[in-house]
């Protein structure tokens, strides 16, 4: 299967955008009315910021991309408005409400993981730079990671109103919509992201997650296959594929991708726990107990892994030998992938979580 095909002529591309935009219009319109409720629930965002953060206008539909988008491929946000020489703010920083907030100041707070404060600052930033797609994009990310999903959706949509070709905006809007249980709408945006960059593993992985959330497991697994043909070492595609197979009752088939995910990233407790689930479902209780045990050791707060360890210890003989060699299974699965794709990408990208900016 060739997943690296290029698009047709421009008229065909426009028709595809029209169809996809119509498909997602209804979902975005339905979500726009929830913005006021979300703002009222935000306990970690200032009252003044709530007043300033009215839902962006025109969120009911997204524009068709122009023949050439002047913002496509932009890498530096709003530099004309970003005169600054900031140090990374500390947690105790008291922001002067009279001073304008620069993009870099707000971004520094976001990178420090203070998402509620970052929302406040990016709200102030987009008030003075409403046409900068990156301001709305980062406000959307901060709101999403702070648990304010409808606010995140509204501003990611706004960023795409300004720059329809923003790949990361499409991908992360799809992820937010998955969290909002809007799988079909998420799939629409993820499909557009894939059309923007057919070789983006993140776009294919997100499209697969969206399809799975919408209940189309067959197509979701096909998209995970495509992502893994591009990068057999994409651990989150491996993990997500394995988890979906477990959900489908195909635990034995899930062991291969999960064993490879663990082989590539042995310190990830989520991968270990899911491998334990696959092994247990396939009847390998001793190997499952070992996987659960490592997951619990890696993350003492992983309640599911700890409970599974206690449950299996009651039925597995002490000193029992593992029934399978998961490293051998991982190597065999990778060999099978290499027949269709290539070697794992020479980068750390496959070790990143699926929901990154």
Image (cartoon, rainbow, N blue to C red):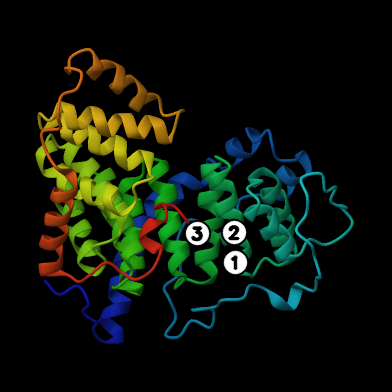
Image position, residue 45 (x, y; %): 70, 40
Q: Is the N terminus in the top left, top right, bottom left or bottom right quadrant?
A: bottom left
Q: Residue at x 28, y 61 (%)?
A: 233
10 Å crowding of disc 2: few (<14), some (14-19), many (20+): many
Image position, residue 153 (x, y; %): 50, 51
Task: State the SS at label 3.
Answer: loop
Q: Is residue 276 left or right of residue 177?
A: left
Q: Residue furthest front?
A: 319
In the rendered image, the vertical position of residue 68 relative to residue 149, given as above or below: below
Query: What's the distance in space between the residues labelled 3 and 2, CA to CA?
Result: 9 Å
Query: What's the distance in space between the residues labelled 2 and 1, CA to CA?
Result: 6 Å
Q: Residue at x 56, y 61 (%)?
A: 137
* Residue holding disc 1: 134
* Residue holding disc 3: 357
Q: Is residue 322 left or right of residue 354?
A: left
Can you see residue 306?
A: yes
Q: Residue at x 61, y 55 (%)?
A: 139
Q: Nearer the viewer, residue 270 or 167?
A: 270
Which mark, residue 138?
2
Question: Which one is earlier in the sequence, the residue at label 3 or at label 1?
Answer: 1
In the rendered image, the vertical position of residue 18 relative to residue 249, given as above or below: below
Can you see residue 22?
A: no
Q: Is residue 106 left or right of residue 316?
A: right
Task: State the SS at label 1.
Answer: helix
């Amino acid at each position: 299967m060739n997943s690296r095909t290029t698009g047709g002529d421009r008229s065909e591309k426009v028709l595809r955008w029209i169809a996809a935009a119509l498909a997602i219009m209804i979902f975005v319109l339905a979500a726009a009315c929830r913005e006021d409720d979300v703002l009222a629930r935000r306990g970690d965002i200032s009252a003044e910021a709530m007043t300033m953060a009215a839902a962006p206008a025109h969120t009911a539909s997204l524009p068709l991309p122009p023949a050439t988008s002047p913002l496509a491929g932009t890498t530096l946000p709003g530099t004309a408005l970003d005169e600054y020489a900031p140090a990374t703010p500390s947690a105790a920083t008291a922001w002067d409400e009279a001073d304008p907030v620069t993009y870099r100041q707000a971004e520094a707070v976001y990178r420090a993981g203070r998402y509620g404060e970052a929302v406040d600052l990016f709200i102030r930033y987009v008030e003075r730079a409403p046409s900068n797609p990156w301001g709305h994009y980062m406000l959307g990310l901060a709101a999403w990671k702070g648990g304010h999903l409808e606010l995140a959706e509204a501003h990611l949509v706004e960023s795409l109103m300004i720059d329809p070709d923003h790949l990361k905006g499409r991908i992360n809007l799809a992820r937010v919509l998955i969290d909002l249980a809007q799988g079909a709408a998420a799939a629409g945006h993820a499909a557009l992201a894939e059309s923007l960059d057919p070789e983006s593993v993140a776009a294919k992985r997100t499209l697969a997650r969206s399809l799975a959330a919408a209940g189309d497991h067959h197509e979701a697994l096909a998209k995970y296959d495509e992502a893994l043909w591009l990068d057999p070492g994409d651990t989150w595609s491996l993990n997500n594929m394995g988890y979906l197979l477990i959900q489908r009752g195909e635990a034995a088939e899930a062991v291969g991708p999960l064993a490879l995910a663990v082989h590539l990233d042995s310190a990830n407790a989520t991968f270990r726990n899911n491998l334990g689930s696959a092994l247990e479902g396939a009847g390998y209780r001793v190997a499952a107990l070992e996987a659960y045990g490592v997951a619990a050791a890696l993350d003492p707060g992983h309640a599911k892994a700890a409970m599974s360890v206690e449950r299996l210890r009651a039925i597995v003989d002490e000193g029992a030998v593992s029934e399978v060699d998961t490293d051998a299974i991982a190597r065999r699965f990778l060999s099978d992938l290499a027949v269709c794709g290539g070697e794992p990408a020479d980068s750390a990208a496959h070790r990143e979580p699926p929901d990154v900016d």
